[in-house]
Image: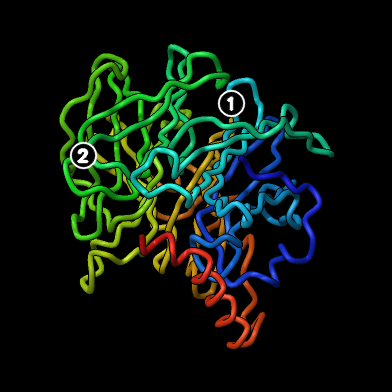
Amino acid sequence: MHGVLNLSPGIEFAESQRFWQGCPTILRTPKGRLYAGWYSGGSREPSLRNYNVLVKSDDNGRHWSEPLLVIPSLREHIICCIDIQLFLDPADRMWIFWTQRDFHYPFDDERHLSTFAAICNDPDAETLVFTEPRFVTPGFLRCQPTVLKDGRWLLCAYDFREGNYHYSESADNGESWTRRQAAKRCCARNFDEPMILERNDGTLWFLARTAVGVGFLAESISCDGGASWSDSRLTGIADPSARFFLRRLNSGNVILIKNDSRHQSSSDRERTRMTAFLSDDDGHTWKHSLLIDPGQSSYPDAVQDADGTIYLVHDRGRFSFGEIVISRFREEDIIAGTVIDRNSFLNQIISKVPAKPYDAAALEHQRAEDKSDLEPFFKR
């Protein structure tokens, strides 16, 4: 059972009807169109009213369309459609991945979390045409696949099972996927949200989020293409249990985008100070940084254009002012520690929930319905 792509979304999915929104993703096509996606719906996450939304920009992120596509939850089947992820593959096809949570199964059952996908062969077309949605792999996907030099794709779809990290691998351009086991977790189970970087020496660097209170990202190394992994351990990279973004840039340098809230003395849980870090030694040190957003922020996702421009999306105040924002900058800006390129900008709003789209009674009614839908499954 999979979600259905709604290519003619109605007013019920409009910005004016949202209580919250967050967890964005971004893609840039060969001809320069930008797509952004995120999820919303209901009064909270998860909710059986959650849905994914897709919008586009044809002017480098200055202006954005109304929703082009929506993937709603399957309420009648007790399945939430959550966390969209966009990916432009080496053949320039646009993949829309999304995660489904099936509440018929407990959290530690592999069937509770599944990743599905639909593919658009021509994302620059005026009218988008997608393949039939299909199951990809067990697990919760929250990052772009890593394409290795040998052509394999690594998809870091994680799960809520205890013990080891997991991911999926494809050797045939996404046609089929094999589930792989990585290192044993060095601390408590969490929303792992890992990413894998292929280093210049051929090793694979597995980086993962850890639980609240740990304060640092975890890492593991594979020296044999993923056949085996070192024991995971904590890094020296501070993190308030939040999603990060890791990718090699066109120059060969590595970018890491995350909350740098260690400067906030109030709590190590604060998701503030979204910052882009740059490394010229495969992530061993981070010599340069650019503060993107000093305020409440989370879930960065980024792409780089052929000319070196980096496009970053993240959410701000997911359950308060509900903004999805985009920033555009270059490596030179990170090295300078401030925006110096005349075409760069930070934190331009793509979408924002209305300040007063509803009265308090409407919100409480929605919360009661959401709680009633899923409360039996959380209690068992």
Quadrant location of the C terminus in the rendered image: bottom left
Q: Amino acid at mark 2?
A: Arg
Quadrant position of residue 182: top left
Left or right of 232 on screen, residue 315: right
Residue plotted at (37% across, 44% down): 193
- The circle drawn on residue 89 is 1
Residue 372 seen in this snapshot: yes
In front of the other: 319 or 36:
319
Q: Which residue is mark 2?
A: 185
Q: Secondary structure at mark 1?
A: loop
Of residue 336 and residue 70, the one placed in the foreground of this image is 70
Q: At which x and y percent is residue 339?
A: 48, 54
Q: How many marks?
A: 2
Q: Position of residue 321 (x, y in %)?
A: 53, 74
For image coordinates 49% across by 67% down, the residue present is 318
Rounded to the nearest whole Å, what is the CA distance between mark 1 and mark 2?
Answer: 30 Å
Q: Quadrant of residue 118?
A: top right
**Quadrant of residue 146 in the image?**
top left
Q: Amino acid at mark 1?
A: Asp
The residue drawn where x is 65% and y is 25% is 92
In the rendered image, which quarter contains the N terminus?
A: top right
Looking at marks 1 and 2 on the same chain, the residue that comes earlier in the sequence is marked by 1
Kindly state the secondary structure of the residue where label 2 is placed.
loop
Residue positioned 65% across, 82% down in the render: 358
Near-viewer residue (172 or 259): 172
Q: Residues within 10 Å of mark 2 (few under 14, many from 20)?
A: many
Where is residue 329? Give x, y as percent.
52, 48
